[in-house]
Image (spheres, coloured by chain):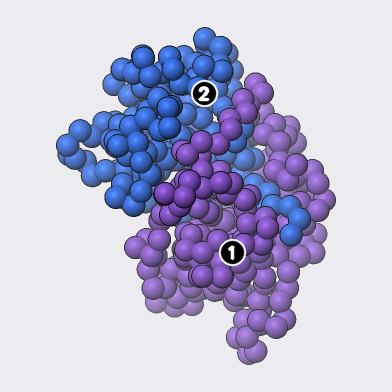
Chain colours: A purple, B blue
């Protein structure tokens, strides 16, 4: 099983929020085998570049994050909306609820969007997010991560997840990362340093492919759904 | 390629990115025949969940999924756990009663939870619905919105909503 369990007591918030009853198996019907088409109209010209959304450049280590959205069998997922959000280089989110005493960066919002290309490809330019404390347990720190939301082409494919960076020393104490019990599945949450796509004198690059479940049999008359 | 990318929680700060101005409006306010589907998201202690995201997906009034109808709604919960979607009542889909598929994301949910909303004014279609038919009485009742469209989502506890594995 690739996905984490709903109840994972080390991640404290699951204790009062995770459903306790067994979920009921639902064989996907046309409702589940179709999904919304949310494309270009929602993406502005600079939405993929989180370093160019303000007058000045944000502080931090500029990086390129790119990869492909594919299905389990490797088929590309083209034309699907990808949304990302993250904290700034100091580990602070631009959100009223974030009480971490690290500075906000006036030149960084931390929101990105793009639509995948024909080969399922996506590319963001951003800054490397910082680690931050979060109070889940004594001395709890989140490893650096970028949040991703991906639709795919079917309701069954909808995925919200987090991308981590290779070799982060905070992995061992993070219950959200470790809620994924299978080591191979956990490894799929971690991007790879990508020297080849690094832009000399400008930015490091990381590669991360997102693998969605297959979409199953889509009814032929509404295959675009 | 072996294995999928696992889910992780949406966390408490998704409001930076995921709420859209038109998110709750599957159809614009004032559209002929528009209905409101709404409720609260509550945790296992009955406390409101003020940092959840409710997403909906449904057929159009003709029971079809096509580009002429967006079909998708998205609403973050407010401080009282409240959410609301403005939409058109879906038609039946392949012998199923009219229904809306729902995903709930929140801090503390390591993956989304999925449920369905059915309509109280469709007793005949609901009685014949194959998904509802497989459920017990209380589970079935938890999936039918009250007249007026009220549908509370209890993540946990004695009134826990029926959730599906898809």
Determine which of the numbered discs, if any, sits on residue B131 in the image: 2
Residue placed at 48% from the left, 46% from the top? A219
**B104 over A25 or under it: above or below:** below
Question: Which residue lies most toward the top here?
Answer: B137
Chain at tag 2: B
Question: Disc 1 to disc 2, how far (Cα)?
Answer: 32 Å
Residue placed at 34% from the left, 18% from the top? B122
**B158 over A56 or under it: above or below:** above
Residue B44, image x and y in percent? Answer: 58, 22
Badge 1 marks a residue whose secondary structure is loop
Badge 1 local density, few (<14 within 10 Å), some, or many (20+)? Answer: many
Q: Nearer the viewer, residue A213 or A218?
A: A218
**A42 over A64 or under it: above or below:** above
Quarter of the figure that contains the C terminus of chain B = top right
Residue A78 visible, this orientation: yes
Disc 1: which residue: A76
Residue placed at 71% from the left, 41% from the top? A4
Determine which of the numbered discs, if any, sits on residue A34 in the image: none
Q: Nearer the viewer, residue B27 or B15?
A: B27
Q: Quadrant of residue A45?
A: bottom left
Residue A19, image x and y in percent? Answer: 62, 26
**B135 over A166 or under it: above or below:** above
Residue B155, image x and y in percent? Answer: 55, 26
Badge 2 local density, few (<14 within 10 Å), some, or many (20+)? Answer: some
Quarter of the figure that contains the N terminus of chain B = bottom right
Badge 2 marks a residue whose secondary structure is helix
Chain at tag 1: A
Residue placed at 47% from the left, 39% from the top? A30
Q: Nearer the viewer, residue B67 or B36?
A: B67
| Contact flag, marks 1 and 2 (Cβ < 8 Å) | no
């Amino acid at each position: 099983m690739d996905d984490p369990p709903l109840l994972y007591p080390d991640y404290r918030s699951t204790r009062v929020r995770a459903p306790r009853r067994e979920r009921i198996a639902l064989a996907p019907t046309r409702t589940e085998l179709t999904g919304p088409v949310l494309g270009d109209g929602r993406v502005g010209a600079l939405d993929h570049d989180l370093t160019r959304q303000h007058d000045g450049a944000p502080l931090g280590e500029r990086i390129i994050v790119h990869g492909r959205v594919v299905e389990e069998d490797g088929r590309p997922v083209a034309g699907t909306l990808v949304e990302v959000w993250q904290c700034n280089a100091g580990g602070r989110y631009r959100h009223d609820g974030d009480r971490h005493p690290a500075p906000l960066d006036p030149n960084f919002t931390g929101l990105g969007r793009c639509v995948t290309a024909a080969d399922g490809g996506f590319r963001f330019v951003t800054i490397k997010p910082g680690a931050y404390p979060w109070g889940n347990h004594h001395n709890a720190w989140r490893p650096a991560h970028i949040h991703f939301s991906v639709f795919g082409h079917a309701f069954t494919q909808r995925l919200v997840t987090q991308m981590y960076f290779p070799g982060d020393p905070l992995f061992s104490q993070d219950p959200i990362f470790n809620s994924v019990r299978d080591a191979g599945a956990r490894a799929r949450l971690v991007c790879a340093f990508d020297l080849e796509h690094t832009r000399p004198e400008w930015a490091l690059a990381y590669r991360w492919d997102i693998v969605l479940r297959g979409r199953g049999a889509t009814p032929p008359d509404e295959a675009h759904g | 390629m072996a294995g999928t990318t696992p889910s992780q929680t949406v966390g408490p700060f998704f409001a930076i990115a995921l709420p859209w101005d038109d998110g709750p409006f599957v159809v614009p306010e004032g559209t002929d025949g528009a209905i409101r589907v709404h409720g609260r998201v509550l945790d296992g202690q009955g406390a409101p969940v003020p940092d959840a995201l409710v997403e909906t997906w449904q057929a159009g009034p003709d029971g079809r999924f096509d580009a002429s109808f967006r079909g998708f709604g998205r609403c973050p919960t407010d401080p009282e756990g409240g959410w609301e979607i403005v939409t058109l009542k879906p038609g039946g889909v392949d012998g199923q009663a009219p229904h809306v598929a729902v995903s709930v994301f929140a801090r503390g949910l390591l993956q989304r939870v999925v449920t369905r909303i059915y309509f109280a004014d469709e007793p005949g279609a609901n009685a014949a619905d194959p998904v509802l038919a497989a459920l017990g009485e209380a589970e079935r009742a938890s999936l039918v919105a009250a007249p007026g469209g009220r549908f509370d989502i209890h993540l946990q506890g004695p009134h826990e909503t029926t959730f599906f594995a898809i």
